[in-house]
Amino acid sequence: MRSSVVFIILGLALFGLACGGGPGKNFATQPVVVASERPAWIDEEPVPEGGELTFVGISPPVSTEAQARDEAMAHAARSAVNYMGTAVKTSYERARISFGLASNVEDPTTSMRTFDKQLAANMVSQMRARKWHHERVRTPTGEGYVTYVLAYVPRENVDETYRKTAGQMADQAAKKAKEEGDRTAQSQLEKASEMWQKLQEQGLFDD
């Protein structure tokens, strides 16, 4: 049952990333019917620190609390995917430039797609809810629920996936280099393999 839920949330997270966002805090403007005092973490999303990455998710107004929970987790997952996509792109571009790699040899788009897919799957499967906040709100069709969630992912799991994926990319580049007949292209692929090995050694987080 849990694997099905994870699959659904991952699908929603990736769809939301492709479409450019999630529900956002605008749903918080819905007229509240029943709610306890809002906790501080709703408006002040924690900065990733220690052994965890934390993300806040919010659901749109929906008819059931269970659906609101799923929507809130899906939004938190989209936030996680967006955050990691930016971090990975920055790390990759810095390394590519330092190794003097031509973009037509080491395709940034293809590389980022591979990283995003691997990290997104890992982060969503490892994401857990720490705190919930539920509100009953008025909607045009009656009353519904808006749910907030404070979710987290262990940093070591994210970094492990990052290192594993970098290692796979290094092996692929090395294999292509051996098969390449053009000496210039071969040299670039060898550098690409070295770059991925370096990223694998460094990991994603600067601690």
Image (cartoon, helix red, strand yellow):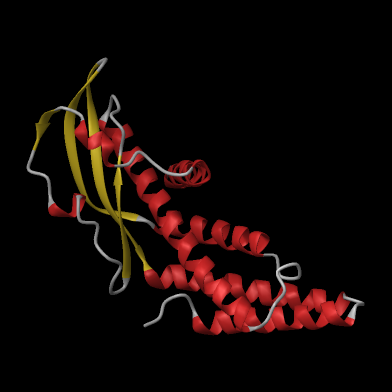
Residues 126 and 146: in front is 146
Give residue 19's position: percent from left, percent from top.
Answer: 50, 41
Outermost residue, top side: 141
> Which residue corresponds to the image point at 75% horizontal and 67% vertical from the top-left?
104
Whole-percent x and y of residue 132? 21, 46
Asked whether, in this view, residue 206 is left or right of residue 111, the answer is left
Query: What residue is shown at x 76% (from left), y 78% (from top)?
Result: 189
Q: Give the camera-side residue of 137 and 125.
A: 137
- Is 166 situated left or right of 80 in this image? right
On screen, residue 185 above or below 104 = below
Q: Is residue 19 above or below residue 157?
A: above
Classify the position of the N terminus by image quarter: top left
The image position of residue 124, as x and y in percent, is: 44, 54
Q: Residue furthest right?
A: 181
Q: Position of residue 3 (x, y in %)?
A: 47, 47
Left-right relation of 205 to 93: left
Given residues 43 and 51, the one toward you in this image is: 43
* Quadrant location, the C terminus: bottom left
Count of picture labels: 0
Of the pair 61 and 28, the residue shown nearer to us: 28
Residue at 28%, 29% in the rendered image: 61
Outermost residue to the left: 37
Name which quarter of the figure residue 53 lies in. bottom left
- Residue at the (70%, 65%) spot, across then down: 107
